[in-house]
Each structure stands twice: as C-alpha cells, then as structure tokens.
C-alpha cells in the first residue's frame, strides 16, 4: 500500500514536473498547492534530493526543481525510495526478501498470489515515468472535451 509519504512525494514531483525546465518552486507553494503539511514535505523533499530526484537551492531565491527530465524518472523507483519494497508481504519481495516462519514457501498459496500482485504492481510502476503520470489527468480531460457534442439543442 502506498503510504502518505509516498503519495505526497509523488504529488510534489508532479508539481515540479509541471514547472518550466530549470524553474524553482518554493516548498510552501508545493505544500499549499497539494494540501501537504509543510514540515512533512520538507523531510520528503530531503529524501528525494538525497536519492537524486530533485535539486535544491537555499536562500531567498531558493526552492526545488527536478534533477532530471520527468520522462527519465520512473514512478516505481520513487515509490521504492520513499516506501520501500513493492511486495505486499516480505516473502514476495525481490529487494528485501524475508522468509516467513509460519509457512512452506513452495506450497504457500498466499505467497504465490502475492508474488503475482508484486509483479503486476512493478509492471505498472516501472513502466510509467513521472511525465506520463503528470499527463494522465490531462489526457482524460482532453478526451472528455473531444467527446462532448458541439451543441445541445434545447426544445421549448
């Protein structure tokens, strides 16, 4: 499950992905625009900076910007940095595998299904870039506008 930390981190990155290349965004603007507690966002942006997703500048003209183009940042990588493994249970994790004490892994149906779940999640998140995620809502809006009738007749 995506935590608030992961959700807020993705929202902050999407906010930055909407900015013109190289332009800095103030933490307060990101927090206010996305309904994220500023103190929590400060910590999240620090982790994103340490992982190489964002760059920061201190001072009066400081702020944050993406460290590389949004189409080069995979959503799965961000989620793993902020929330850890994608697997719903430890014995299905590829990066932080832990053997279960209460089952036989070879015959455990729960583990086998959770391996499928983990794989499905990874296939979606590792295929999508931040740019694609940023544009999801825009594509839906454009499609809705294109599907609307040009004029609606009103009968009296």
Image (tube, rainbow, N blue to C red):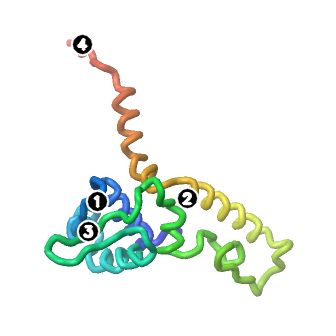
- From the viewer's side, name the closer residue of 133 and 20: 20
On the picture, is 103 further left or further right than 141?
Answer: right
Disc 3 residue crowd, few under 14, some 14–19, many 20+, Cα 10 Å = many
Mark-to-mark CA distance, 2 and 4: 49 Å
Measured as percent of width and height from the top left, residue 110 is found at 74, 70
Mark-to-mark CA distance, 4 and 3: 48 Å
Measured as percent of width and height from the top left, residue 96 is found at 65, 79
Q: Looking at the image, is 118 positioned above or below residue 40?
A: above
Q: Which of the labelled discs sits on residue 125, or is there none?
A: 2
Point out the frontmost of discs 4 and 1.
1
In this figure, which residue is indicated by the disc labeled 1? 22
Mark-to-mark CA distance, 2 and 3: 24 Å
- From the viewer's side, name the closer residue of 132 and 110: 132
Q: Residue at x 74, y 83 (%)?
A: 100
Measured as percent of width and height from the top left, residue 28 is found at 21, 70
**How many numbered discs?**
4
Q: Give yes or no for contact between labels 2 and 4 (Cβ–Cβ under 8 Å).
A: no
- From the viewer's side, name the closer residue of 111 and 52: 52
- Displayed quadrant of residue 124: bottom right
Q: Residue at x 69, y 79 (%)?
A: 97
Q: Give yes or no for contact between labels 2 and 3 (Cβ–Cβ under 8 Å).
A: no
Which of disc 3 and disc 4 is earlier in sequence? 3
In this figure, which residue is indicated by the disc labeled 4? 155
Question: Circle 4 sits in a helix, a strand or a loop, which is it?
Answer: loop
Question: Circle 2 sits in a helix, a strand or a loop, which is it?
Answer: helix
Mark-to-mark CA distance, 3 and 1: 19 Å
């Amino acid at each position: 499950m995506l935590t608030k930390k992961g959700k807020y981190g993705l929202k902050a990155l999407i906010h930055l992905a909407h900015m013109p290349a190289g332009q800095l965004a103030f933490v307060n603007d990101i927090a206010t625009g996305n309904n994220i507690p500023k103190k929590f966002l400060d910590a999240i942006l620090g982790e994103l900076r340490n992982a190489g997703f964002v760059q920061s500048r201190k001072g009066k003209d400081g702020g944050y910007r993406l460290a590389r183009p949004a189409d080069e940042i995979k959503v799965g990588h961000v989620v793993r940095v902020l929330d850890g493994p994608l697997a719903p249970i430890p014995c299905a994790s590829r990066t932080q595998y832990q053997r279960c004490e209460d089952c036989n892994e070879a015959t455990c149906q729960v583990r086998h299904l959770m391996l499928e779940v983990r794989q499905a999640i990874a296939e979606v998140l590792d295929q999508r870039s931040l740019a694609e995620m940023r544009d999801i809502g825009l594509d839906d809006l454009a499609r809705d506008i294109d599907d609307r009738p040009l004029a609606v007749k009103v009968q009296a």
